Amino acid sequence: MADIRVKEGKKGKTYQVRYHDKSKKSGCSYKTFRTMKAARAFLHDSTSWQEKGGSAIGSIENAIDHWLEICGTEGRSGNEPVTAYTLQNYSYLADIMKSYNWDMSLCELEVTDVVAFRSWLLKNKTRYLARKTLSCFQAVLNEMCVRGFVNKNVASSVTIKSSTRYKEPVELPSSSDINSLIQAADRLANSKNRQVAKSWERYRPILYLAIDSGMRPQEYLAIAGSNILDSGVQVERAIERNGELSVPKTPASRRFIDISPDVLDMVRHYRDNLAPENTYDLVFPTATGRWQTVENWRKLAFKAVCIEAGLMEVVESERGIYERPKFKPYALRHFYASMLIEQRLNLKKIQTLMGHSNISTTFDVYGHLIEKLEQQEKGVSGMLARTAQLNPCGNSVASEA
């Protein structure tokens, strides 16, 4: 039996709706509203939905949950159900939507409420994450609209535009670029020039470890010998910006990362047979027994391997025309992340491996890669693309010059 109860508390008078809910052991759920109008609207919506054979959907939170279920089972707007990977992304965005204080029912929602939600997103989330969340909220209301739970999508006109004032997508080497770097490091380590070969005895395993682990440069340059374990590495320290050796800046940065057996053997071999003695338990100490700075690694080693690999670009600035590496050392970390995303690894696992304190950071930095993968999973939709799939052996319709 559904009803409305008036409650008096610290926040003054509120209105509690008791409604039927088969998912609860008691058979009932409760929802509190600030106004009688909102409570009645919720009660009306939930009762109408029960008559259709479903569970209560009067609240915005229930609408979000229902939309999420549709995405994974029926498929929204007549499309195929989304993949488990995309559903996982939607679930994260759904949690953000539900964390907002919705003090009105679904049918009571107005454009001004959506605008207030947008303001909350922009104040509490990064612009990218705010835009993605609002886009999903529009999809929720659109689905509720076509299914008859609301008359119109009041969020359709409320948007967040992307802006070039915000950081561009991360620089991302291709697999071919990475292979070129690996082969270049191998050649330098086997150089006939003894000084070059000697330097690359150390630089080569550093480069391999950077690619294979996705660690930050300040982490792999400071890695301790005792943190090279049977199947990977334990990240427990890093080089601070002032050049001092310290623990990672956040607890999330202290993590275990699985490493390929060949890379692990290479790192162990250098640690056990070639590394100079040092008092800091460094795997890759300099000749003086201290850690190499990130700046020296970038200028002395990474630039050299980019030159050897042919990964240089010509740029023009106030200083004139000069060559520089196409990528920075951090690009190796971004490549690692892109491979995890391409393998559709669990997002929480990606967050852990990357050492991000919050999964929103993972979305913000690599959101464009996640979006790209989601688009690929949807398949081609353009007429020419579909025609090409249906008739892969057809002749080109383009005229020759």
Image (cartoon, grey):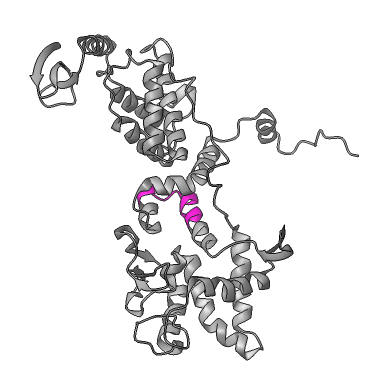
Q: Position of residue 331 (x, y in %)?
A: 54, 60
- Residue 51 higher or lower than 23, as above or below: above
Q: Residue at x 45, y 35 (%)?
A: 132
Query: x%, y% of residue 80?
Result: 47, 29
Left or right, 226 with reference to 366: left
Q: Position of residue 396 (x, y in %)?
A: 80, 36
User: Dividing the picture into quarters, in which one does residue 225 lie?
Assistant: bottom left
State left or right for residue 333 relative to residue 31.
right
Q: Quadrant of residue 384?
A: top right
Question: In this rendering, would 90 be left or right of 196?
Answer: left
Which of the pair 61/109 is nearer the observer? Answer: 109
- Residue at 35% x, 56% y is 352
**Magenta segment boundaries in residue numbering:** 337-348
Q: Residue at x 71, y 63 (%)?
A: 319
Instruction: Indicate the quadrant where residue 92 lies.
Output: top left
Q: Is residue 1 visible?
A: no
Q: Is residue 343 part of the magenta span, yes or no?
A: yes
Residue 359 on image: x %, y % = 37, 47
Horizontal relation, residue 69 to residue 78: left or right: left
Give the tally of numbered discs. Answer: 0
- Check the picture and name the quadrant holding the C terminus: top right
Magenta-colored segment: predominant secondary structure: helix
